[in-house]
Amino acid sequence: MIIGTGIDLVEVARFTDWHKKTIPQLLRIFSQEEIDYCLSQAEKSAQRFAVRFAAREAFYKALCAAWPNMPIPFLTLCSMITITKQHRVPKLIVDWNQIKDIPENIKVGVIHCSLAHERLHAIALVTLEQN
C-alpha cells in the first residue's frame, strides 16, 4: 500500500557553483559517495547535485504525506539519505535508525525513486510503500 508520494523540480542553475563548496558544506546535505560521484565529471556536477537535492525534497514531501505530524527538519533528513545506483537504476537509501518519531505500527517497506535531469531542470519522484 502506498503511504506517501512526493515530487520536486529544481532549476539546475541554482547548483552551478556547488562544486566550489567545501566538503563539510556539501556533507550537510549529501553523502561522501554522492559528492564524489557529482564531482567526478565537472560538466555534469550541477545536474547531479540538482537531481539529488530534488530527490531529498521529494522524499521529505512523501514522508510528510505519510506522517504529517512528524517533526523532522529538512536538513536533518538530508544527512540521513544516500542515493546510489543499482543496475543503472537510482536507489534512495535512508538510515532509518536516525529517525526517531516514526510510528511503530507503520514501517516503510519499499522506496521507489525516479530521477531525471537535463541542462535546465532536474526532477525527482519518490513513493513510499508500507510493509
Image (cartoon, rainbow, N blue to C red):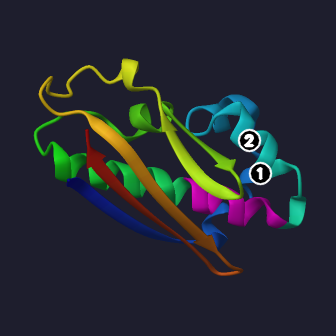
Q: Which mark is residue 108?
A: none
**In the rendered image, which quarter is residue 70 located in?**
top left
- Helix, strand or loop under label 1: helix
Please give the range of residues in magenta.
44-52
Q: Determine whether, in the image, residue 5 is placed left or right of residue 103.
A: right
Q: Nearer the viewer, residue 71 or 85?
A: 85
Secondary element type, mark 2: helix
**Residue hosting label 1:** 38
Residue that appears at 74% across and 41% down: 35
Considering the whole magenta stretch, tell me its main secondary structure: helix
Q: Is residue 12 left or right of residue 35?
A: left
Q: Are marks 2 and 1 in contact (CB under 8 Å)?
A: yes
Instruction: Report which quarter residue 107 is drawn in.
Output: top left
Kind of residue indicated by mark 1: Cys
**Residue highlighted by disc 2:** 35
Residue 56 included in the magenta stretch of the image = no
Dot 2: few (<14), some (14–19), or many (≥20) neighbours within 10 Å? Answer: some
